[in-house]
Image: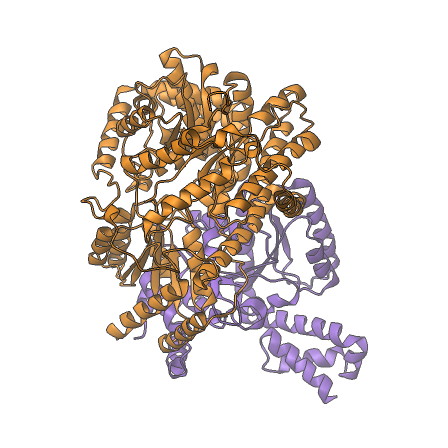
Amino acid sequence: MEPSIERIRAGEKGAVAQALNFVEDIRPAMRADIERFLARLEESARRAQVVGITGPPGVGKSSLTSALIRELRQRGVSVGVVAVDPSSKRSGGALLGDRARIRYDVSDQGVFIRSMAAGEQLGGLARASQAAVQVMAAAFDLVIVETVGVGQSETDIEDIADTVLFVVQPGSGDTLQFLKAGVMEIPDILVINKADQEKLARRAYLDLKGSLTYKEVAEGDWHPVIVRTSAVQGTGFDELADAIGAHGQWLEKRGRAAHRRLKAQRWALATFTRLAGELGIEEAGGRKRLLRLLEESEAATHRQCLGLLLDQRSAG
Amino acid sequence: MADVKRDKPWVMRTYSGHSSAQKSNELYRMNLAKGQTGLSVAFDLPTQTGYDADDPRAQGEVGKVGVPVGHIDDMATLFDQIPIEQMNTSMTINATAAWLLSLYVALAEKRGVDPKLLQGTTQNDIFKEYLSRGTYIFPPQPSVRLITDMITYTVDNIPKWNPTNICSYHLQEAGATPVQELAYALCNAIAILDAVKATGKVSDEKFDKVFGRISFFVNAGIRFIEEMTKMRAFTQMWQKLGRDRYGVTNEKSLWFRYGVQVNSLGLTESQPENNIPRIVLEMLAVVLSKDARARAVQLPAWNEALGLPRPWDQQWALRIQQIMAFETDLLEYNDIFNGSPVIEEKVRSLIEGAQAEIDKVLDMGVVDAIETGYIKERLVDANRQRLQRIEAGEQVVVGVNKYLESEPSPLLSGQDSGILKVDPQAEREQIERLRAFRAKRSQTEVDAALQRLRDAARGGDNIMPVSIAAAHAGVTTGEWANALREVFGEYRAPTGVARQVLHAAETEAAQKVQGEVEELSQQLGRKLKILVGKPGLDGHSNGAEQIAVKARDVGMEVVYEGIRLTPEQIVNSAQEEGVHVIGLSILSGSHDTLVPQVVEKLKAAGMNTPVVVGGIIPPEDAEALRKAGVARVYTPKDYELNTIMSDIVKVVREFNSAVG
C-alpha cells in the first residue's frame, strides 16, 4: 500500500514511518512502485535543507546532534534525523545504538529519528538512506544525516546533503592534517566540538582557521565557517544553527544541485590529481580539459565525476 | 573444645526491604530477633534513582525491589524501635547515597544520638552503576564529587561510617571474569582515592583513615577455589596499592575490608532447591581462609530467580550462615591455606592478569575507560562467552543444561507458589503518606533548604551539611534529586553493545536461526528489525544486552537504547524505527504495570507490532501478560538464546502472515 503524501507532508509520524518502511523494501518487484512514489513525492512536496553531520568516531556527533535539535526546536524548526550506523557485514545484522545518545522529548511531534545500517556501500551511507532523506525532507523543515566518516569516505554524504558539517574534537591531529593536506574536502561548516577543553580547542581553531584562509575562495563562493561547540556547556549551538541557516540561504541563491555538482567536480579533480599526479593530469589533456569534460558530462555525484576522470586516464 | 579461642564471626545480614517503611521495619525486627547481627537495607528503585512515589517515572516500581524512603518520617518508621547507635546498617544506595545518609543522620539527631556513633556503609559506588546496575543519575564528574564530599565529611563527622563500598559484586553479575573483577574494582577505588586526594581537603595523615574506610562489596561464584584465591589476591593487591600509591603505613588501614553477597547470577529458576548447595559452596569461598575472610556476609534466598523471597526464605539464608559460623570448626583455625603452592600459584596468576588490565585502564584514565564504553564492552563480551559456554554445554549447570529430570518440587506447591507477593496497594498507600507529609511541612523552609542545596552543588561547598538540613526541613527524595539534576544534568551511560564485534554462527543452532532470519527478511522486503527495550527504572541490563548482541549476530537489525525508558519512549522509537517486533526486559517485578502500558500505547499510536517480554515473571503473571496481548514471555529458564531467537522469528512470521 502506498503511503499518503498529504499525511507525510503534514509531518504525521505514522505516515512518515510507513513511507520509510516502504522505500526500504529491497524486493525487486517493489522497485518500480518505490521509484514512482519517490517521483510523486519530489513533485508535490517542498524540500527541506539536508544537513550532513560527519566526522571521526568519538568526537561527540550524537551529543552535538542532540543539542542542535534542541536549538532548532526552540526556533520552531521541525527536524528529521537519519542516523547511519556502521554495519556488520558477514551476517548482515546491525546494532543501531545511536538514537540512545540523542536526547529528545518523545511527546514532540516535530522530531523524528530513524536509524539505518551502513550496509555494504562505501562512504558509510545506507543503500536506502537517499530515499529515506527524500521522505524526511518532504515531512520536516530540516533533515540531519548523521554518519561516521573521515578522509575520503564522506563523499557520499556530500552527494546527499546540501550542507556538510564536519565535526572534530580538539587535539585530533590526524583529521586536521587530512584537511590541511587536501585529502579531505573542506566542509561547509567545521565544528570543533568539546570546546570546553579550551586550550586545545583554541589551538585547533587557530590551526584550522589558518589552513582555511590559505585556501582560495572565489568570488560568490561559500566561505567555510568554523564553529566551536560544547555539548557539556551547551554553548555554540546558537551560532551553529545560524551558520546552517546562512548556508541554506546561500544555497537558495546559488541553486542546490549546481552547488553539489560543482563540489563533486572539484573533489574529483583533487582526488584524481592525488592519484595520478601532475604528470597524469598532463597526460589526460590538462586541468582545463578535464574540467570542461566534467561540466559537459552528465556526471553529478562525486563517484561519477571521479569515474569519468579515471576513464580518461585509461583511455589515454 | 572449651580452650579453643574462636574468631569473632562476620556480620550476618540479609538484603531486605519491600512495600513500605513499616512492613520493612517489622521484617528487620523479626530478622534481628532471629540472630541477624546487622541490617542491609534494600531501597526501591524510585528511591535509588531519586524520584518521589507520585512521580510518573515511579509508576509500578514503588516498594517492588525494596523499601520506599521518601522523607525523614519514612526513615524514622524504617528504624522504629531499632537502636541505630548500636546497629551496623548497610545501605545499598548510590546516586542518592548522600541523601539517604543525610536522612539517617537527621534521624539520629532527632533522637538525640550523636552521629559519631553511627556505624555502617553506604554503597555509594557510581562506577559500577554505569557498568552494571544502572541506578545512576548524574554524569561522572559531579557523581565523583558527591562521593568525595561524603568521604571528606564522614571521616571527620561520622568516623565509623564506610562512606563508599567499592563493588566488584555487580561486575561479576555483568559477566566479569575473576581477573576483570579484581582489575576494575581496584581501578574504581583508585579513581575515587585519587579524586579525594585531588580535593586537597584531606591531610596526608588523615589519608590513612580515608584509605582504611574504603570497603569492598564482592561476589562469590560457584568456582569456589578460584573465588577464594580471588579474595586472597584482592587483599594482597589492596595492601600494595595502599603502600605504593598512597603511602599508607598504618597496618590496620591497609586491611582489605569486604562484605559479600554470594552470586545471584548462577541461581537457577529450574529445580530451585539446588540453589541451596550452591549458596553454601559460594559462601565457603569467602569465609574459608582466615587471611582473606569476609567481614560481612549476606546470602540470597534460594528462590531469587523466581521472585521476591518470603521471610521464611530469608530465614533459611540466615540459618546457613549461623551453621557455618557456630556449628562448624571453621573459626577455630588460623589460615589453612598459607604455604600451599597450588593456592599461591593461582593467586599469583590472578594478580598478574589483573595488574596488566589495571595498567591498561589507568593508561586510558578510569573515567574515560567508562565513558568511552571500553570496560562495559569487555563485560558484555565476557558475559556473552559465559552464556555461550552454558548453551554449548561446556559449562554444566545442573538442572538447566544437564540432569533435567525432576520430581515436582514441594517447595513451590504452596498457595503462594513459593514467592512473596508485594501488596498491590503499597504504591497507592505510599503516595498517600507522601502527600500527607508534604501537606504538613513548611513550604518556605523546604524552598530555602533546596536553594541552599543548589547553591552548594553549584559552588562546591560540601553537599552533606545542606542535605542534612534539607532532611530536617522535610525535603523529599525526589525534590533533593531534582534540585541536583538542575545543577548537574542527567547522564546516559554507554550500553557497551554498539561496538561488539560480530560473532560468526559456529553452532548448528546458530546457523539455523541465521537462515531463518535471512529467509524472513527476504519475505518482508527488509531486514528483520527488533527493538530491545528496558522500560521502568530497573537498570539490570545484562539480559537485554545479550539479547541485543545475539539478535545482531543472527542477522537482525537491532535498536537498543539502554535502560530506563518510559513506555512512551519505547512506542515512539518502535514507530520511528519501523521495527517488526519489540522485546522488553524487566527484572524489577514491575512488568504487571509497564508491559500493559506499552501494549496500550502501541494501540493508541495505531500500531500492532508484536511484543515479547523477558524477565523474572511468575507463571500467573505470564498468563496475565499473554491475555493483555503479549506474544511470548521468557523467564530465566529460557537460557538458550538461539531458541529464543528462533521463536522471535516465528512470532514475526506468524504475525505478518496473519495480517497478510
Across and down, in percent, residue A303 comes to 61, 76
Given residues A175 and A315, the one toward you in this image is: A175
Across and down, in percent, residue A245 comes to 52, 55
Given residues A273 and A48, the one toward you in this image is: A273
Is residue A283 shown to the viewer in this render?
Answer: yes
Residue with the most extreme left position:
B415
Across and down, in percent, residue B564 comes to 39, 46
Is residue A11 shown to the viewer in this render?
Answer: no
Chain A in the picture: what colour? purple
Given residues A18 and B261, the one toward you in this image is: B261
| Residue at the image position 39 percent from the left and 82 percent from the top | A32
Q: Is residue A16 above or below residue A77?
A: below
Q: Quadrant of residue B485?
A: top left
Q: How many marks?
A: 0
Chain ID, orange in image = B
Q: Quadrant of the C terminus of chain B?
A: bottom left
Across and down, in percent, residue B422 comes to 25, 39
Given residues B241 and B424, the one toward you in this image is: B241
Residue with the most extreme top position:
B112
Q: Would residue A240 be found to the left or right of residue A150 on screen?
A: left
